[in-house]
């Protein structure tokens, strides 16, 4: 784990939809999409490399998975951090892409929240150690796309593109991969994040190969096995969202309320988040939330249906902070998903990854 982490703000390391409906939704929003400069970088770009990644993580009963630590990446500012007053704002028309298998999602009105099947842990290898972040399956043309934080896909410390042995495991629990291992093939993020570590664009969309089990047997496409959340951008700030993830790290005062073994959620209305200069973050959004490290990359889902366990991803956990300086994290932030985010998503969601299993 990076030893330069300080305190108070941390980056927190179904049925098939008709292809024509998705294409129409994407094409109809293309005119509103701002011209973004996507950064596209390979991960396991060959079948041999992908199978090597599965072997790496599944060996010895998932020993390295069990040993993985929640990811705290890069340094942080000290002192109280303001929630509110940032520059987050729409840059075009509001747009949505539906979840896999759902033309319409009815928001939940019940207090008991069923966790989405789409969420899981992102694992990677860095400087001789294994780490995890959070992530989610998201709608895409080939049902092979994962949404997570940019700092959970790119090595911002070494500035050397993507992280090693990257794999997504939905429903992960204590070394088990109930729906298989989904190895990352290519990662897409904003040029400004990949090159300047601008956390206003701290998101990544990763194409993954078909899943395989521990015996390298093909188990099919990610979205066919666990579904995929919808995607939305240029949404109204002040909208209620559920943030899901696997928090595990301590609060600044040392308390550890989470184990990281099971997913947790926060619920709240978004607000513009104050600037955090250490991360070049000036236009993020935030919600009141007690998440700690490990929740990085977990989805923020609007219009979430607890019955169908689906909604629309319009953010991913990026930073956590302590707004009143009492030693407890009390808010989380996400990059604001705008038309440029949609452009990055569009580039990633249109790519097929292929099979690697038997």
Image: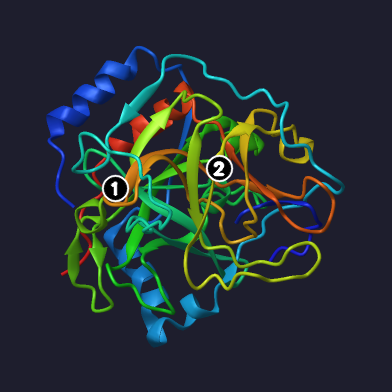
Q: Secondary structure at mark 2?
A: strand
The residue sitting at 58% across, 73% down in the picture is: 259
Q: Quadrant of residue 312?
A: top left
Picture quadrant of residue 313: top left
Q: Is 54 or 290 nearer to us in this picture?
A: 290
How many numbered badges does the structure rendering display? 2
Q: Residues within 10 Å of mark 1 (few under 14, many from 20)?
A: many
Observer-nearest residue: 133 or 250? 250
Q: Residue at x 67, y 22 (%)?
A: 87
Q: Is residue 191 above or below residue 69?
A: above
Q: Residues within 10 Å of mark 2 (few under 14, many from 20)?
A: some
Residue depth check, mark 1 versus mark 2: number of the one nearer the observer? 2
Q: For marks 1 and 2, give the CA distance.
A: 22 Å
**The C terminus - image quarter:** bottom left
User: Which residue bears the numbered disc 1?
Assistant: 228
Q: Is residue 66 left or right of residue 10?
A: left
Query: Residue 113: x and y, percent?
Result: 40, 56
Above or below, 323 against 222 in this view is: above
Q: Decide: marks 1, 2 in contact (CB < 8 A)?
A: no
Q: Residue at x 25, y 19 (%)?
A: 27
Local secondary structure at mark 1: loop
Residue 53 placement (x, y as % from top left): 38, 68
On screen, residue 254 above or below 307: below
Residue 86: x and y, percent?
A: 70, 26
Which residue is most to the bottom? Answer: 60
Locate residue 117 relative to residue 205 in the image: left or right: left
In this rendering, the answer to whether 67 lies above or below 149 is: below
With 281 as the anchor, is 182 left or right in this view? left
Residue under pointer 2? 268
- Numbered badge on residue 350: none
């Amino acid at each position: 784990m990076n030893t330069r982490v300080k305190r108070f703000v941390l980056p927190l390391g179904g049925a098939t939809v008709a292809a024509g409906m998705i294409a129409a939704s994407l094409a109809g929003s293309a005119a509103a999409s701002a011209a973004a400069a996507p950064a596209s970088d390979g991960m396991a770009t060959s079948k041999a490399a992908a199978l090597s990644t599965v072997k790496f993580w599944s060996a010895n009963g998932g020993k390295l998975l069990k040993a993985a630590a929640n990811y705290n990446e890069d340094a942080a500012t000290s002192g109280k951090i303001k929630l509110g007053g940032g520059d987050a704002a729409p840059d075009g028309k509001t747009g949505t892409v539906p979840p896999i298998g759902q033309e319409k999602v009815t928001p939940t009105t019940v207090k008991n929240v069923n966790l989405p099947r789409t969420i899981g842990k992102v694992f990677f290898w860095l400087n001789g150690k294994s780490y995890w972040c959070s992530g989610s399956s998201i709608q895409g043309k080939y049902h092979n796309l994962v949404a997570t934080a940019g700092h959970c896909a790119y090595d911002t410390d070494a500035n050397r593109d993507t992280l090693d042995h990257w794999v997504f495991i939905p429903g992960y629990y204590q070394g088990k991969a109930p729906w298989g291992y989904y190895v990352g093939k290519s990662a897409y993020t904003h040029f400004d994040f990949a090159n300047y570590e601008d956390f206003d664009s701290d998101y990544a969309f990763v194409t993954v190969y078909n899943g395989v089990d521990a015996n390298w047997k093909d188990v099919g496409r990610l979205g066919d096995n666990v579904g995929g959340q919808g995607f939305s951008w240029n949404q109204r700030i002040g909208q209620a969202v559920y943030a899901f993830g696997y928090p595990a790290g301590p609060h600044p005062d040392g308390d550890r309320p989470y184990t990281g073994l099971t997913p947790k959620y926060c619920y709240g209305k978004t607000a513009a988040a104050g600037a955090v200069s250490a991360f070049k973050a000036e236009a993020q959004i935030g919600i009141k939330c007690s998440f700690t490290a490990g929740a990085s990359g977990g989805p923020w889902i609007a219009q979430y249906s607890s019955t169908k366990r689906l909604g629309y991803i319009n953010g991913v956990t990026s930073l956590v902070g302590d707004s009143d300086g009492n030693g407890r994290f009390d808010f989380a932030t996400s990059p604001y998903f705008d038309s440029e985010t949609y452009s990055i998503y569009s580039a990633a969601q249109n790519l097929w990854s292929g099979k690697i299993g038997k």
